[in-house]
Amino acid sequence: MSMKQRLLTWCLCLSLSMAVTPAFAEQALVAVAANFVPPFREIAIEFEHATGHQLQVVGGSSGNFYSQIKNGAPFDVFFSADMERPKLLEDEGLGVKDSRFTYAIGRLVLWSPNESLIKGEEPLRSKQYKLLAMANPKTAPYGVAAMQALQRLELWDSVQPHIVMGESLGQTMGFIESGNAQLGFVALSQVLNPKIKGKGSRWDVPTNLHEPIKQDMILLTKGKDNPAAKALIEFIGGPQAKRIIERYGYELK
Amino acid sequence: MQKRLLWLVFLSMPLILMGMDAAKAVEYGELVEKDGKWQFKETEDPVLKLIHDKHLITDEDYFKSTDRTGKNWIEPADAVLNQRKEIDWLHYEKSLLRLPDWLDLGFENRTRFESTDHPWRTNQVIGNGRTDAQVAMRSRVRIGLGGDGPLRLLFEGQDSRSFMDKDPGDFRDTTTVNEFDVLQLVGSLTVNNVFGTGLRTDIHFGRMTMDFGRRRLIARNDFRNTTNSFDGFHWQIAQDKTWRIRAFATQPVVRDDVRLDQQYHNLLFWGTYLESRHFPWFQVDAYYFNLNDQRVPNGTTHRTYSTAGGRLYKDPKPGEPDYEIETSWQTGHRGITDHFAHFQHLDLGYTFNLPWTPRLVIHYDYASGDHKPGDSQNEGFDTLFGARRFEFGPTGIWGPFSRTNLQSPGWRLIVTPAPNLILQVKHRVSYLAQSKDFFGNTGLQDTTGNAGTSLGHDVELRAQWAVTSNLDFDFGYVHWFKGSYFNNPAILAQMPSGGNKDSDYFYAAIRVRI
């Protein structure tokens, strides 16, 4: 074999060996609730390394994803911020039956950028604030949990005049970060975001003060034959993903 | 033979690279519906993604970089002074060099080629229809200390220069050239929740650039190659986006093209600006500025002006009409003469709820000129430190129209075929407000008034394409159909030969930021 032929063979072999690998990789389109995007970023990297499959990730509000899926959006997997929407999709035949499960349980926290403001539930009782931010219970499960906690602490009626409601957790956090509200109820995962972590003061609301904030995922009908989608569901239930989910302040079943 | 082997290896490379990269991607984006079809659109910055995929930065650095932009962007102190688009872009080197959160670094370069013909200014000698071209280059370096605050220090250096500017008739001045100078050196304090009231306050001191309102009177110049800056103090107090009050006391920086810029104790500029955003249909600005310029020993050029005015407007939204009215009044003295001048602006617009969201705007501008030059009353509006590109077309070596002695109706159509692509067509008709006064800063004047007021009309085409927040292109073309004013013998005698013929202007610019 001449030098030229050897080089040609080498190039072709190398090209084929590398180009052929992805032929086994599939791609899945995934809808992820905004509060779960930070941990999902890490999970996606681990998933890609472990399986070679590709993911296209769209982050946003669960309500918006629900209506997009109803209108034919070709998502393969849906990570919702609640239990209701995956259940509805399953009932409506848009989700694969029995594929639904709780991938994380959210933790509610009372947080303030002021380092000395929050010591347990005390500031809620002594009204050491002008405005208290929380997500709207009509649109956000964390809002429902905050309302339940305030009701069980028998503070719901007295804090009413001081409440400012965000349409989402992101907006609620914006109220607090900007100083318009002195404190507020947000997700622990938001407070553990590297940008915020270690700043201000917080109280992790005991889980017995509200119903669990269960976040469910579901394999959608469009993804039922997609190996990447099925592998993702399996991966989420595995130890690597669980470690990341817990690190972001979520609880597991 | 060896050459063929090299080609073989070269041609194999794309295949090898494709093979290496195809399986290495998690893409983040959004799902959009277009013509009944759902499409995934990647929203990540391609360069940052490449840096990450090549493992030049860690996952954490990558996430931090993306968190610093978009919806997670926290308004820094200098966004109070300038537009967000001036400072909000991905700083790759911050991630690559693993700079700490409290340190920021940024570089910017904009290079523009521009060309015009049939010059008309009195200080241009080129004639006979020759085309004049120039390359204008502006480079900036930004170093920020203090991260998100509350205390922050910012240095911004700027180097503005031009090339191809040595031909006869080319003009080179401090609107184009200002080599190696300090544009900003500003310290700031931000308090996000003043005494628990929820108000935000910012204090700035040092050398700074400023934007106020629609930027007609005070602007951090964008199209122009050099930038206005001010030495002094600025303060704001604001309630989120609902209202804010700003006040400043400064010495405007006087640019020198090669030496360091300086300020003068007898050039002072101060004022206050109020903004209310309580009602979307009736957003209100009110302002008062005071300029005291006594630099030149010759008292006839002293400027002692008070400028008071206001602005009413509604922001454009698809399917809704919008408007903008600005009125500004100037009183004081120019030398020993009394000064009384004003300018008025009106925009009526409508944004259609159609593909490409076309927006049609009708403009009208009136800026007073001197009714009777040489008498005891001066009436020419002084534009202070404003910008005019967005209303009167490109500046640079073009820019015949300015906000003094002018009245100009016009219209503009803007379409956005893609979120990062803006196409515009504009047409304006222009007249002198007073026939005996100067035509802007061109030096042309007919004190008899016989030349009339018709300056003609101009048509402008513009395309702006922002590839990413770090790379954008800007292209423009203007044709100016000159009016009868330029055919008057008195005006013909002041212009270079052929100055009365129609002029064309073309430019192409690229801006890179890292």
Image: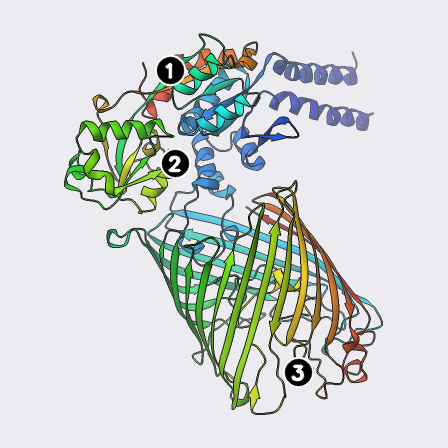
The answer to whether B507 appears left or right of B378 in the picture is: right
Q: Residues within 10 Å of mark 1 (few under 14, many from 20)?
A: some
| Mark drawn on residue B147 | none
Marks 3 and 1: same chain?
A: no
Instruction: Check disc 3 and report its element: helix, strand or loop.
Output: loop
Q: Amino acid at mark 2?
A: Glu
Q: Are marks 1 and 2 in contact (CB under 8 Å)?
A: no
* Quadrant containing the N terminus of chain A in the rendered view: top right
Residue identifier under label 1: A102
Gap between marks 3 and 1 measured at Cα: 77 Å
Residue B176 in sight in this render: no
Marks 1 and 2: same chain?
A: yes
**Spot occupied by residue B43 in the image (x, y as percentages of width and height):** 55, 34
Residue B390 in sight in this render: yes
In-front residue for pair B417/B512 = B417
| Mark drawn on residue B437 | 3
Q: Residues within 10 Å of mark 2 (few under 14, many from 20)?
A: some
Q: Amino acid at mark 1?
A: Thr
Q: Residue at x 54, y 13 (%)?
A: A221
In the rendered image, which quarter is residue A224 located in? top right
Gap between marks 1 and 2 measured at Cα: 24 Å
In-front residue for pair B107/A27 = A27
In-front residue for pair B52/B499 = B499
Q: Residue at x 44, y 26 (%)?
A: A62
Q: Numbered disc 3: what chain?
A: B
The answer to whether B326 appears left or right of B198 in the picture is: right
| Mark drawn on residue A167 | 2
Q: Amino acid at mark 3?
A: Asp
Q: Residue at x 46, y 25 (%)?
A: A32
**Spot occupied by residue B91 in the image (x, y as percentages of width and height):** 50, 44
Q: Is residue A46 above or below residue B474?
A: above
